[in-house]
Image: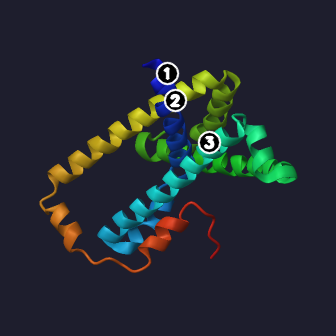
Amino acid sequence: MNKIIQIYFIPAAVFLSVLIGGGYGTGREVVEFFTKYGQLGGILAICSATLVFTVVLGLTFEFARQFNVYNYRLFFKKLIGPLWVVFEVLYILLFLLVLGVVSAAAGNTLQERFDIPSYIGLISMPFLVAFFVLFGRMIVEKALAFWSVLMYGVFITYFVIVTGQSDVDLFQQTTTADIQSGWWIGGRYMPCITWR
């Protein structure tokens, strides 16, 4: 059972934690890529993005299996050849950007929800990340797996509360709502950087 969790659950949990933490942590992405297409269009855009992420993750795992590259550096050396150094530099810059966004979001959340000064979240988040990185892969994997389970528990609880307290039949509203055009593009291009 432990091997099944390590093979199937841990990689998916880590992927979801990184994706949601770095990509959806602020909620801005949801507005930008999903809700502007209406209720049903937003749901269809989410399904489109889910399909893209599923295919990309599956191809990534298959690439690693085919070339026997289960190490981060070996994977990118095989995937992009000598350009892996450029990728590494850009990845570090992206990491700093994401860390800044997540730290700012943590600071704002602490201030808005708990009336704790925002600089505490802004300062503590990088230290928490450094702590998890320094204490090894197993702690990070377990923390991200636990976070995924906790996060889905919160999502499901929130969904049940919202749908249970609404006087409007949300499911009927969703099925009769207009679908704004372009939902499939918004969902597909959501993982990419878009320039406006």
| Nearer-the-camera pick, 69 or 157 | 69
> What's the residue at 60%, 43% (across, down)?
61
**Of callouts 2 and 3, which one flags the residue occurring earlier in the amino acid sequence?**
2
Res 128 → quadrant: top right
> What's the residue at 54%, 48% (across, down)?
58
Q: Is residue 104 visible?
A: no
Find disc 1 in the rendering and name its residue. 3
| Nearer-the-camera pick, 164 or 43 | 43
Q: Assign a secondary structure to mark 1.
A: helix
Q: Is residue 188 above or below residue 149?
A: below
> What's the residue at 82%, 49% (across, down)?
84
Find disc 2 in the rendering and name its residue. 7
Find disc 3 in the rendering and name its residue. 122
Q: Is residue 38 above or below residue 96?
A: below
Label 1 close to label 2 by CB (< 8 Å) = yes
> What's the residue at 24%, 74% (across, down)?
177
Q: Is residue 148 above or below residue 31?
A: above
